[in-house]
Each structure stands twice: as structure tokens, then as C-alpha cells.
Image (tube, rainbow, N blue to C red):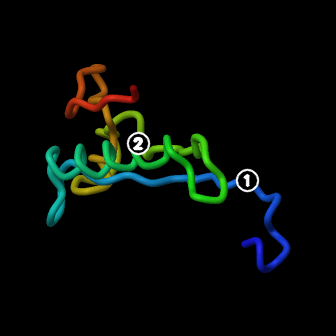
Amino acid sequence: MGNHGGSGVPLVVSETGWPSGGGMEASPANARIYNQNLINHVKGGTPRHPGTIETFLFSMFNENQKESGVEQNWGLFYPNMQHVYPISFN
């Protein structure tokens, strides 16, 4: 971005995640690996911009009122507040 006049623009990961069910390769294990690796990675920033990258995970809760399948299964928690899989933000 620096080559195109955007060196002062902050980097934000606006929405990312991995489904824990309802589709191919969608499992609690794969969702945990993806999200944990993402958290670990964004804590270090980039070579040119060290420090934490502001990141928004999709989604906080599984949404049991959406269409069945993958759309229901993006959350870190079930609607009853139980973890879908363990994850660490430390």
C-alpha cells in the first residue's frame, strides 16, 4: 500500500472465520485451528506495521435461526453461551 500512497492507512481485518459444521471441511477442529492461528498471527502485526491488527471474527454466536447448513455454524459459542470449541485470546 505504501507504493500507492496508502502508507498511513491502518490495516483492519473486517470479517473472517471458519464454519464449525454444515459443509465440507467445516468442523469444530478446523474452525479452532483457523481462528486460533488467525489470533496468533494478528497479535504480531506486519513487518512494516508491528503490533496488533484490529480483527473482527465472524461470528460470536452460532445462529440457530438461519438456514440450516454452514450459515448457522460460524460462531465461537452456541446460543446457550457454551463454547463450540476452545480458543485462547491470550
Q: Which quadrant, please, contains the N terminus?
A: bottom right
The residue depicted at 63 percent of the width and 52 percent of the height is 12
**What crowding class fits label 2: few (fewer than 14 Cα within 10 Å), some (14-19), or many (20 or more)?**
some
| Place of residue 41 in the rendered image (x, y in percent of width and height, measured from the top left) | 42, 49
Q: Earlier in the sequence, mark 1 or mark 2?
A: 1
Q: In this view, does 71 lie to the left or right of 44?
A: left
Residue at the top extreme of this rendering:
81
Disc on res. 39 = 2
| Place of residue 77 in the rendered image (x, y in percent of width and height, measured from the top left) | 30, 30
**What crowding class fits label 1: few (fewer than 14 Cα within 10 Å), some (14-19), or many (20 or more)?**
few
The residue depicted at 49 percent of the width and 41 percent of the height is 43
| Place of residue 60 in the rendered image (x, y in percent of width and height, measured from the top left) | 41, 34
Q: In this view, does 85 lie to the left or right of 9?
A: left
The residue depicted at 16 percent of the width and 44 percent of the height is 28
| Number of dots carrying numbers | 2
Q: What element carries label 2?
A: helix
Residue at which label 1 appears: 10
Measure the alpha-carbon separation of dots 1 and 2: 18 Å
Disc on res. 69 = none
User: Residue flagged by tag 2: what amino acid is it?
Assistant: Ile
The residue depicted at 32 percent of the width and 29 percent of the height is 88
Of residues 48 and 4, the one drawn nearer to the viewer in this rendering: 48
Of residues 51 and 18, the one drawn nearer to the viewer in this rendering: 51
Residue at the bottom extreme of this rendering:
4
Which quadrant of the structure image shows residue 7? Answer: bottom right
Of residues 50 and 32, the one drawn nearer to the viewer in this rendering: 50
Residue at the front extreme of this rendering:
47
Q: Which quadrant, please, contains the C terminus?
A: top left
Q: Would you say the residues marked 1 and 2 are in contact, meaning their CB atoms lie under 8 Å apart?
A: no
User: Residue flagged by tag 1: what amino acid is it?
Assistant: Pro
Q: What element carries label 1?
A: loop
